Image (tube, grey):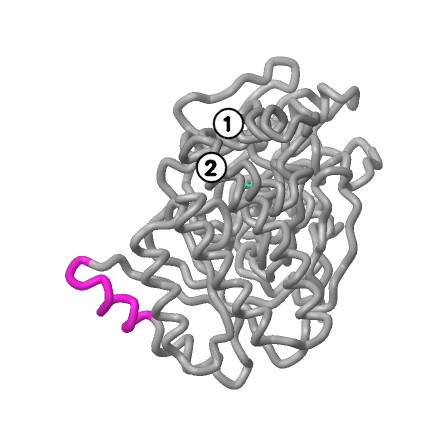
Amino acid sequence: MNLLLETKSYQRSLERFHQIFGTNPEIVAFAPGRVNLIGEHTDYNEGFVLPIAVDLFLCVAARPRNDRTVRVIAADLDDWDEFDLDEIVRDDNTNWRNYHRGVAWAIQQNGIGLKGIDAVVASDIPIGAGLSSSAAIEVGFAMTFLYFVSADVPQPTLAQWCQLAEHKFAGVQCGIMDQMIALMGKADHALLLDCRDLSHRHVPLPKGIAFVVADTGVPRTLAASEYNIRLQQCKEAVQWLSKLLERPIKSLRDVALEELGQVFNEMPEPIRRRARHVITENNRVWAFQQAMREGALKRAGSLLLASHASLRDDYEVSSRELDAMVKALMSIDGVLGARLTGAGFGGACLAMVRKDALEKVLKEVASRYKIALGNGSPEPKLIATNSSNGAIVQKL
Ligand code: GLA
């Protein structure tokens, strides 16, 4: 049985397609959400990340047209979009439109002429939870557009085009992690990715553990502006370090923790702490994947907690709710480690959980979180995820 065909977003996209166009789509593209296990805010510093693709999907049901018009219906938003492939512009008022528009623009910018399509998009990836629904929409549409012109683009290149779309159309200067994992995920594996040259390796996930996504119920706020500020601060850190260490440094990836220690006191706040987060986080990615290979789950769990502390104290992208969620998760026996995942500023935490504790976590964490936050606490959501493969196009 093809499990993808059981997904809710698939059913919704198909149903809506029928309603609107009175026929079956020719294809459905499935693009997964992702959870980053460790390696946060390292990708745009040419560092290392270790995400998994998860079994929450965005679906694009589509058929080709004979002209240059793109029509997109957003089944979940009750909204639609229409544009001409020869005149693609940003929509300053309605952000969801910028993802598929941006992707069409980026592909054509790279010399591939596209055909118009009729499409319906539906998604089971919660928006603003830090599971990268945005990379899923980019990748889902990129694969749809390319399918209808029979273009074969290597996955890392396509990931870069999707990233370009996000930079130019959605206004977030994101790294490459989300697009790479949405395309290259592999069930039962994490993707160890070097964001400098995009070399990668699939790391098997240990048996007997599950990854839980604990959404704080507070969508990411300030994400775009604060994110771009962090990026800028890392660039400043590189300039400081080149000067103080008296050698050319391309990115924070090139600096060892001992070197930072030598000049830490000469660097300004908060730049030096931003640098410390990135450098220690890169080290944690390596230590974590090693711990997973050795089945040293306790050690892996401590690295997740150390990552959270660094994101909270040095990188300052956590929030009261994210901190409370980590605490609530860690209060349950069998939770090996937890941390905020994704950009931060709201969104979700990830917890690494022994399978025999999974039920208890799903049952009890929400109330512990709400008690900790007191009156007016946002409504959290606990999701047990399974790792999945990357995006595919299914012909109907
Ligand atoms: C967002 C970006 C990614 C990455 C993470 C933080 O998800 O899209 O490129 O920078 O934040 O690790």
Q: Residue 2's spot in the image, x, y percent?
A: 71, 66
Q: Amino acid at mark 2?
A: Asn
Q: Residue 177's spot in the image, x, y percent?
A: 64, 44
Which is more toward the observer, 343 or 143?
343
Whether residue 375 appears in magenta in the rendering, the answer is yes
Residue at the spot x=59%, y=30% of the render? 241
Number of numbered labels in the structure image = 2
- Against 96, is 36 above or below? below
Residue matched to label 1: 232
Whether residue 373 appears in magenta in the rendering, the answer is yes
Residue at the spot x=58%, y=62% of the render? 7
Q: Which residues are magenta?
A: 366-376
* Secondary structure type for disc 2: helix
Residue at the spot x=60%, y=62% of the render? 55
Q: Which mark is residue 265?
A: 2
Residue at the spot x=70%, y=41% of the render? 195
Between the C-alphas of marks 1 and 2, the distance is 20 Å
Residue 297, by quadrant, is bottom right
Q: Amino acid at mark 1?
A: Gln
